[in-house]
Image: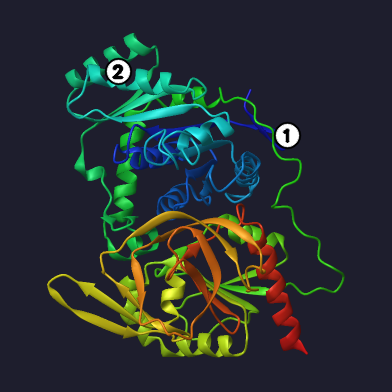
Amino acid sequence: MTMTSGNRKIPRILISADRSSSGKTTISMGIMAALKARGYVVQPFKVALDYIDPEYHTEIVGRRSRNLDGYLMEKEGVIDVFTHACESEECGGMPADIAVIEGVRGLYEGLAADTDIGSTAQVSKMLNCPVIMVINARSMTRSCAALILGFAAFDPDVHIAGVILNNVGSQKHADKAVAAIESATGIPVIGIVFRNPELDFQMRELGLIPVPEGRRAYDRFAERIRLVEATVSDSVDLDKLIEIANTAGPAAAPLQSRFEIKPAAAGEIPPKIGVASDEAFNFYYPDNMDLLQAQGAEIKVFSPLHDSCLPDVDALYIGGGTPEIFAMELSLNTPMKEAIQKASDAGMPIFAESAGMNYLTNSMTLKKRGAPDVTFDMVGIFDCDTVYGSGKRVVTYTNGVFEKDTPIGKKGNTFIAHEFHHSVLENISDGIEYTIDVTRGVGIKDKKDGMIVRNTIGTYIHFHGSSYADFAKEFVKNAGKYQSMRNQ
């Protein structure tokens, strides 16, 4: 029996590994592509809060990949996100008929050493989902069996149902490793991927090159994705993988979903939220967009890179991304910078998240070893400067509390979120007002975050609306207030 979504049963599989850099991202993408080529409507997922890997999933299958995080979300929240995503009619108006979940790091890596919180293993148990282990078999044969045996015995509630060997050097190498694993563990090897550097994707400080940039900058981007699909189709027993996916056990869907549409009052006009989306700003959780719409908002997309004016909206959401790669173009787009400044001056609710906040500072300086610093003027709402290339890198879960009312949270609201950046703020004005007290994490300065100017908030914190439920509710409510004010 598989997990019921509505009145349907959703086959699902989770792709994990013994450690990072085992090849699970590439193999997960290949499995998604190969299943789609067979005619399946594939719903992709990524364990933990990550933007870039899900962009690749989305590019491949045509459905927005979603994040599942056992630290930020309770079990009911994980199942709610899973169910909502599978039922969404995104691909030709059809719900998904199979789900592929890519894990994070090693199977058991999580928040602490003595629990599975925040790990891939935790999500596999929450969703009652079988696991396929990807093993980097370089220089290993019989040791692969010991590795799988240990992983399977470590937590009997985690169902390791198959193995894919990656980085295999020869058929002889493969035969020895398969014989060792299957005789010692009884777990089938369902795939052998031979060593091929052509399968690798380009990386940067925080992971893969984002998809919108990859499409624009690299001639062989689409070709690389096709190669991954072809390799996995030839190397993995997809029939066996589908059979395993159909063994997923039951998991009760929540009685009430956070994604249920809030009914509009008679005569109510939906507030419009402008979302910055282009090569520079593309780090968004799809669930946040769905939750904003569930609260009654209409989403309007705009580009700080390419557009010269804002759409007719009642709020702005400028998310994360890689503006440092496009700093000159952003700086030269003066009409857009002036339009955002004017909107802020008028009191429009603006939420600038991480890289979005960097864009709203006075300037952006790029440091590169062996070259002079280069500085570009930015929007100038926040009286401080952004620096990329300082060597500082922050990737952590964040807990905090709002100390004041803001466009995305009221005083006293608590949250669990995360930080994910490699920039710093310098020359911060003594007059900057902060609205968030960071109880776990780094923040902007001295455990403070949430800079606010008028009704514009900037933060290094990335929020997921399934974890911090007040995000969508408060942001849409404040957009509606601004709409009413400007329509008077």
Residue farthest to the top, as pictured: 183
Q: x%, y% of residue 107? A: 41, 33
Mark 1 and mark 2: Cα distance apart in space: 41 Å
Depicted 267 relative to depicted 42: above or below: below
Q: x%, y% of residue 207? A: 33, 54
Q: Looking at the image, which is closer to me, 387 or 279?
A: 387
Q: x%, y% of residue 197? A: 20, 42
Depicted 82 relative to depicted 323: above or below: above
Image quadrant holding the N terminus, namely: top right
The amino acid marked with disc number 2 is Ala
Judging from the image, what secondary structure is the residue with disc 1 in?
A: loop
Which residue lies under the disc numbered 2? 146
The amino acid marked with disc number 1 is Asn
Q: Residue at x 29, y 79 (%)?
A: 365
Q: x%, y% of residue 327? A: 33, 78
- On the picture, is 84 further left or further right than 275? right
Which residue lies under the disc numbered 1? 7
- On the picture, is 73 further left or further right than 53? right
Q: Looking at the image, which is closer to me, 63 or 146?
A: 146
Q: Mark 1 or mark 2: which comes first in sequence?
A: 1
